[in-house]
Amino acid sequence: MDNAEILALLAQTLARGQTGHQPEQPLAARLCDACTEILGAQAGMMSLSSASERLTMRIAEPAFAQIEDLQAVLGEGPALLAFAEGRTVVTHLGATADLSTELTADVAADGAGRSGSRQADASAFPMFTAMAAAIEGAVSVYAVPMRPLGRVIGVLTLYLRGDVRGGRLARSLEEAEFLADAAGAALLGDPDTFDVGTQPWWPQRARVHQATGVVTAQLGIPPADALAVLRAHAFGRASSLESVVDDILDRTLTFSHDGTDPGTGGIVTDQDPRTEEP
Amino acid sequence: MARPSSLHDYATHAPSVLGIDVEASILLRQYGADISAASSTPAAARCDRVEALAGDGPCIDAMDELRVRVVTDVAAEQSWHAWRTQAVDEGFATAIAVPGEVGGSAVIALNLYSRDASPWDARALAAAESYTQLVAAAVRLHLEVAELEDRATGLYRTMSDEVAIQRAVGTIMATNDCSAQEAARILDSAAATRGVSRREVAETILRTLASEES
């Protein structure tokens, strides 16, 4: 399928979604749904980034939200690597060694479009790979950067189970990359996309930023470090970032300095025992 | 004693530096937004939070008028109802509020609370004023360093407006022990009163409360 045909397919899929049951959705969410459908994935997530800020636009299916949480908690994973390096990153979680080798060979063979731009490189995010292994069943993750005009503005992440086409997308990686670039170009022309206040997912992300501010004040550290503390705490108690955020904003979890305990790096937490997770 | 590196350290060290039995807290005003920035004890923190939320108290007046306010008898005080009630409940008998000009949009005030009748002799007042000027100078230096660092790293400038605002809302929630709605109102009010953007107020608050040495 050439580029013109892919664009026509995108337009048709978007139009079908527009007349569907949720026509009021923002453009980013509709584009995410359309790309997910065209590429034959089971779930899609689109993230937009403004410098250091990474904002999740949409998590299409709860079943894959756990993987998204893991990336947020650890600060590493395929989507973050795809954004940082501006290349497609493919990883197969929970796959057998034989299947993983086979899929990796597929990715290498499909790399003619953007030479050297694709790798199946789970070794670049070892903690993510190790933690994600606990997720039941094989899952393939395709993180494709959106690069309209050659600049990475976000990442389209696609998920599918290993029992769907053996963990392969319905179309080639080259087509997936063109589609992601086209979606990115469409978003750049949408005035509402980068106005976070108009986005339906913003209240959830706003709570993360408020909690970051709370920890900034409690520990007197820059916001980026405060966010790292939140992620580390979520990782430490094996819970989601959102769960930690809820506890901080509900005042059941507080951070403070304790210079007498160098073993904790001088940071201690006070967790209301009624709210501690088992 | 370790060199103070944050407002929390300055508040904590105040009693030993001043050599008097007091509990200390520091209010920070930026673009008119009053934040209970640091305290040596929970009781002093609660008093300052009530004062910051009410927008009424000796520290507020000290910053408004840039002069020291001495409260010789908290229980008999006729002004500042919310603050007075909280201070009496905490068992404080007397207090002083000492302002310090940081420069630009920022002012601080050191609140010192005592459970004794009157520890404020001339020597103690002079020491409190000197210490407050030291804290103000440290805040000024911190803001200047943060500005220089940001030119190099873009730590704050690259933050989107809404992210900076929500993070500042979080810091105000923590320092003033208030809801997100109340914190947003403080931010909005400061921006409207001073004719600057909410983002500018938010960024300044974040810069001040994030100590690079913590």
Image (tube, coloured by chain):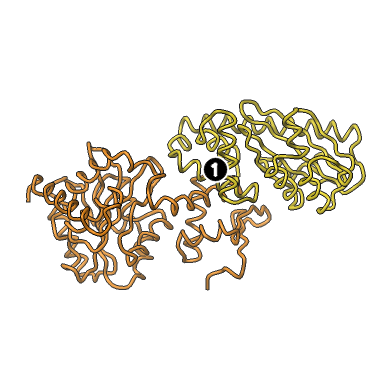
Quadrant position of the C terminus of chain B in the picture:
top right
Task: Write down which chain is painted yellow.
Answer: B
A72 or A129, which is in the foreground? Answer: A72
Residue A126 lies, with reference to residue B167, above or below; the image says below
Residue B85 lies, with reference to residue B56, above or below; the image says below
* Amino acid beneath label 1: Ala
Residue A186 is situated, as x and y percent measured from the top left of the image, at: 23, 42
Residue located 58% across and 29% down the image? B194
Q: Return the chain for callout 1.
A: B
Residue B161 is situated, as x and y percent measured from the top left of the image, at: 45, 38
A222 or B2, which is in the foreground? Answer: A222
Residue located 37% across and 64% down the image? A66
Report the side of A159 relative to B139 (left or right): left
Report the side of A254 relative to B91 (left or right): left
Crowding near the residue tagged with mark 1, few <14, some 14–19, many ≥20 C-alpha atoms within 10 Å: many
Local SS, label 1: helix
Residue located 49% across and 41% down the image? B164
Residue A8 is situated, as x and y percent measured from the top left of the image, at: 11, 48
Report the side of B148 relative to A20 (left or right): right
Residue located 20% across and 65% down the image? A167
Quadrant position of the N terminus of chain B in the picture:
top right
The tally of labels here is 1
Residue matched to label 1: B168
Please identify the residue farthest to the top as the structure is shown.
B104
Residue B36 is situated, as x and y percent measured from the top left of the image, at: 68, 43
Task: Write down which chain is painted orange.
Answer: A
Residue A138 picture quarter: bottom left
Residue A91 visible? The answer is: no
Residue B140 visible? The answer is: yes
